[in-house]
Image: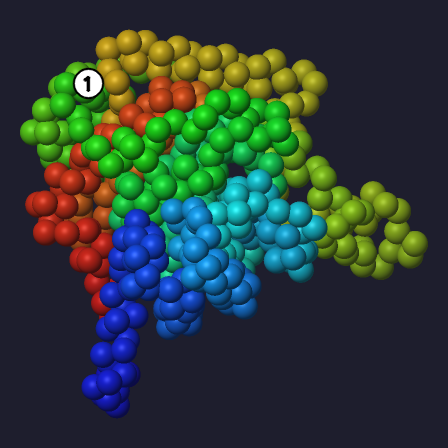
Amino acid sequence: SMSADTTDETSKGSTVTDDIIRLSAAEMASKLGDGSLTSVELTQAHLDRIAAVDGDVHAFLHVNAEEALATAAQVDADRAAGKTLHPLAGVPVAVKDVVTTKGQPTTAGSKMLEGWIPPYDATIVTKLRAAGMPILGKTNMDEFAMGSSTEHSAYGPTHNPWDLERIPGGSGGGSAAAVAAFEAPLAVGTDTGGSIRQPASVTGTVGTKPTYGGISRYGLIAMASSLDQAGPCTRSVLDAALLHDVMGGHDGMDSTSIDAPVPPVVEAAKRGDVSGMKIGIIEQLDGEGYQSGVKARFDEAVAALVDADAEVVTVSCPSFEQALAAYYLVMPSEVSSNLAKFDAMRYGLRVSPEGVEAPSAEQVMAASRDAGFGSEVKRRIILGTYALSSGYYDAYYGQAQKVRTLIARDFAKAFETADVLVSPTCPTTAFKLGEKLEDPMAMYLNDVATIPANLAGLPGMSLPAGLSDDGLPVGFQILAPATKDERMYEVGAALEKALEKTWGGPLLAKAPALKENN
Ligand code: GLN
C-alpha cells in the first residue's frame, strides 16, 4: 500500500538506503574509509529503518538518535581532518539493555529498573565509544536475561523478523532481531546459558560467546557471574570477529578478566581455512531427537566441512546429560545472590505496601520486589535461595558444582582428539509466541546444547546452517577450547563460505517477513 503513492525518485532514494543497510559491517567500514559513505548517512539510514519496522519487530527498548548522530558527525569530521581512526569508526551498533550506558536508560527488561539512568558506562561501551561507533539504542531482552524467547521482558516481546508471530529467541532476542531486520549492522549480546547463540540460531544470524573472561563483565547487570559473558550479534562471521576484537581484552575492573591479548579472531575469520582440522561431533548432541530439518541441515553442514578438507571424528561427553540440571541449580543460586541488591533502598522501583502505616524497610523491600520482578525472575530467586539454604547446599549446589567439573573434563578429553566440537545450536527452529510461556521446563530445554560451554567457560558460536522444512533458520554451533576463540571463527568462516555458495548469497536474503516490511 505504501508503494502505490510513492514517486520514482523516492523509491530510488529508499533503494539506496536499503542497499546501505544490507551491507556487512566490514563493507560499511570500507565504504566509510574510502569516503563513498559518511557515518551520518549510514547512521540515519539505520534510524530510518528502525522507524519503519521496529513498530512490528520491537527490537529496541530505547533509541538514541541524537547521541548516535552526534557521534557519527564527530567521526565524519575527524576523518575529514585526516585523523587516524579505528577500522569500525562510524559503524553503528545496538547494545543489549543489560549493559550500562551512562546517561541512557538501562532496564535489563525489568520494571525494577524502569527510569534508571546509570552514572557510568560498562567497559565494553567505553570501548565502543572510543572506537567511534554510534550507539543506536538499547535492545529488548527477557527480564534480567532469564528466558529463551524475550517474552519475559516487562516491556512486551520482540518478534522474529522471519515470522512476526514467532519468538526471536532469548534472552537477547532484541539484539538478534535488530541485526536480522537490518535495524543495526552489529549488536552486543550477553550469554549465560545461550542468550547470544540461541537467538542467533532462530533468526538466521551469527552470535558468539567468547571464552569466559575474554570480554569484560564490568558494567553488565549480573545474572549469574560465573557464567555471564558478553559477545557479538552480527550477520557474518567476519563482522562477529571485528566486534569481538573491539570489545575484548583485559580489564582491571573485572577480577575474572583474562590478562592476555584478544585471540587472533579477525585473521582467522578472514582466512576461513579448515583443511586438516579435526571437527568433533558430540555424540550426546548430534541432533538425534531434534526437529527433523534441524538434524538434516546439521548433517549437510558437517558434509560441507568435509568437502573443505576437514576431518570428522565423533567424541563422547557423557556428563552433558546432566548439564541442564546442573545449570538450573548453579544459575539460580547466583541469581538469588546477585538480585538481592534490588532492595528499593538505593535505586530502582520503590513501592509502599498497601494499607500499612509507617511500613518497615523490610515491608517496603518485600512490596517493591513483589511489584518489580516478574514471575520467571521470582521463580529463579526462590529456587536459588532454596538450593543455597543450609542443609540443602551440599545436596544441590555442591552436587551441581561437581557436575560442572565433570563437564569440563569431558570437554578436555574431547579436545584431545578434535580441534573444535560441533552440534546443532538448538533442538528446534523458532516456536510461536505464547507456545512455551506457561511451560518453564519446555522453555529451558532450548538451551540443552548451549549450556555446557557456559558451565566450562568455553567459547561458542552459532551461525546459520540453512532453512528447516518449515522455512525457518537452523543454527550450527561450534565450540573451541578456552582462549582458542580463533578456531571457531576459522571454522565458521569456512562453513559460511561453503553454504553461501549453495544458497547464492546470505541466508537472510530469504526472510519473507523482511521483504514485506520494505
Ligand atoms: N535461556 C537461558 C536461561 O533462561 C539462558 C539465558 C542467558 O543466557 N542469559 O537461563
- Residue at image x 49%, y 31%? 249
The image quadrant that residue 489 belongs to is top left
Image side of residue 239 versus residue 122, left or right: left
Tell me how many marks there are: 1
Image side of residue 46 versus residue 367, left or right: left
The residue lying toward the viewer, choosing from 333 and 514, is 514
Disc 1 is placed on an element classified as strand
Does the Cβ of the disc 1 residue fall within 8 Å of ligand 1? Answer: no
Image coloring type: rainbow
Residue at far right of view:
358
The residue lying toward the viewer, choosing from 137 and 20, is 20
Q: In this view, does 464 lie above or below 60?
A: above
- Residue at image x 65%, y 57%? 103
Q: Position of residue 11 (x, y in %)?
A: 24, 80
The amino acid beneath tag 1 is Lys
Q: Position of residue 120 (x, y in %)?
A: 66, 47
- Residue at image x 28%, y 41%? 237
The image quadrant that residue 480 belongs to is top left
Image side of residue 477 versus residue 199, left or right: left
Q: Which quarter of the image is occupied by the N terminus?
A: bottom left
Q: Position of residue 376 (x, y in %)?
A: 55, 44
Is residue 64 in sight in this rendering?
no
Residue at the spot of label 1: 278
- Residue at image x 51%, y 18%? 400
| Label 1 neighbour load within 10 Å: few <14, some 14-19, many 20+ | many
Q: Which quarter of the image is occupied by the C terminus?
A: bottom left
Is residue 276 in sight in this rendering?
yes
Q: Is residue 503 above or below residue 50?
A: above
The residue lying toward the viewer, choosing from 433 and 16, is 16
Q: Position of residue 94 (x, y in %)?
A: 45, 54
